[in-house]
Image (cartoon, grey):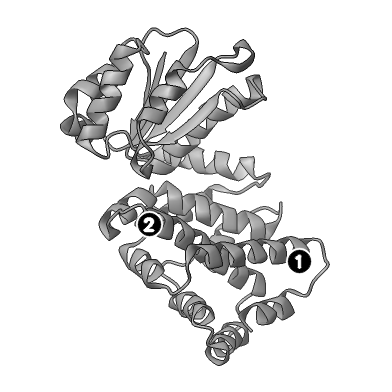
């Protein structure tokens, strides 16, 4: 059996992919018959053959999830051959899940035969296109509800006015608003207050100062943010947001993607991509600080720490 998810809305594509995987894990909690394979990750494709041919544990249905199948023509041709050789279109005991970021035209241009097979009537196919108008507003509403938040139509329209249909940015801004309001109703005023229309250069500079271990400059920048009346929790959410983006960018850059490709895949502004790549933090250091930031967030919400003191401690 084949499941083919594709389209230019990479955030909702990831959501749809995760839903299929979670459904399989819920049905087969052992996890022994789920294989996640990134074709562009450098692992030999022979491992994919082993996954297809190996017997399932406990007689469970097997799910093999692939991504970046179209990243290289030679690899795409190999995947096509495997699907045909092992009759995966009609297999009863294994499902091949393929999720690809790109329009049908783009993917077909890379390997028409593979795209045609994956999108045929014998597959479960979903084209995840960019949302517009009422559909976009309904999606934003649902994202707030999934975080146990309520909002009004004014807030949703203002979010769309700032971020458009960039679902990656919208999801980040929704998460930031939900964390800040903590189950309170989110209004248009909150969006105006908490959602930046432009890239926050002070936060970029603060992260750079931390990475360069320039304590005096980091403390100065943090002091300036707080002195101007910026809410400490907003500062924390912005730092968390930038570190999360940095980790995603550095991971893709390590895999060999260009700045332009990273910007398109992550929907992160090209300037922010360049800043993240050039940041002196390595991935391990960034991940360690990201974990500490999440601990600060949890400690503050549980009333165990003073947030302003914790931020000063972090940058020092």
Could you tell whether 246 is left or right of 222 in the image?
A: left
Residue pictured at 38% horizontal, 43% vertical = 41
Q: Is residue 287 left or right of residue 120?
A: right
From the viewer's side, name the closer residue of 206 and 238: 206
Image: 278 above or below 30: below
Residue depth check, mark 1 versus mark 2: number of the one nearer the observer: 2
Q: Residue 12: percent from the left, percent from the top?
A: 44, 38
Q: Which residue is mark 1?
A: 300
Depth check, front residue: 185 or 106: 106
- Residue 203, percent from left and from top: 50, 75
Depicted 99 relative to depicted 282: above or below: above
Q: Which quadrant of the figure has residue 210?
A: bottom right
Residue at mark 2: 254
**Residue 128 appears in the figure:** no
Is any atom of residue 87 visible in this view? Answer: yes
**Secondary structure of residue under mark 1:** helix
Crowd class of label 2 (few under 14; some 14 to 19; many from 20; radius 10 Å) = few
* Element type where label 2 sits in the image: helix
Q: Is residue 125 above or below residue 18?
A: above
The residue at 51%/54% (across/down) is 172
Q: x%, y% of residue 109?
A: 16, 33
Q: Quadrant of the C terminus?
A: bottom right
């Amino acid at each position: 059996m084949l499941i083919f998810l594709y389209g230019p809305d990479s955030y909702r594509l990831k959501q749809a992919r995760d839903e299929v995987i979670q459904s399989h894990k819920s049905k087969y909690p052992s996890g022994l018959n789920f294989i996640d394979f990134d074709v562009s990750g450098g692992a030999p494709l022979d491992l994919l053959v082993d996954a297809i041919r190996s017997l399932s544990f406990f007689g469970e249905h097997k799910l093999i999830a692939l991504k970046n199948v179209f990243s290289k023509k030679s690899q795409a041709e190999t995947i096509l051959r495997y699907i045909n050789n092992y009759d995966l279109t009609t297999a009863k005991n294994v499902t091949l899940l393929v999720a690809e970021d790109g329009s049908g035209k783009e993917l077909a241009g890379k390997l028409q035969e593979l795209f045609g097979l994956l999108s045929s009537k014998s597959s479960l196919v979903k084209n995840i296109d960019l949302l517009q108008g009422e559909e976009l507003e309904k999606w934003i509403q649902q994202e707030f509800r999934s975080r146990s938040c309520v909002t009004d139509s004014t807030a949703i329209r203002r979010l769309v006015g700032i971020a458009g249909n960039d679902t990656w940015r919208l999801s980040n801004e929704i998460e930031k608003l939900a964390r800040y309001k903590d189950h309170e109703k989110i209004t248009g005023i909150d969006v105006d207050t908490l959602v930046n229309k432009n890239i926050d250069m002070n936060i970029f500079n603060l992260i750079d100062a931390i990475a360069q271990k320039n304590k005096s400059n980091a403390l100065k920048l943090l002091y300036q943010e707080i002195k101007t009346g910026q809410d400490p929790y907003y500062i924390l959410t912005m730092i968390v947001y930038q570190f999360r983006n940095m980790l995603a960018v550095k991971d893709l850059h390590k895999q060999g993607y260009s700045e332009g490709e990273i910007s398109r895949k992550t929907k992160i502004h090209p300037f922010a991509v360049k800043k993240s790549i050039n940041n002196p933090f390595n991935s391990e250091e960034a991940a360690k600080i990201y974990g500490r930031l999440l601990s600060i967030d949890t400690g503050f919400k549980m009333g165990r720490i003073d947030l302003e003191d914790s931020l000063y401690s972090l940058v020092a």
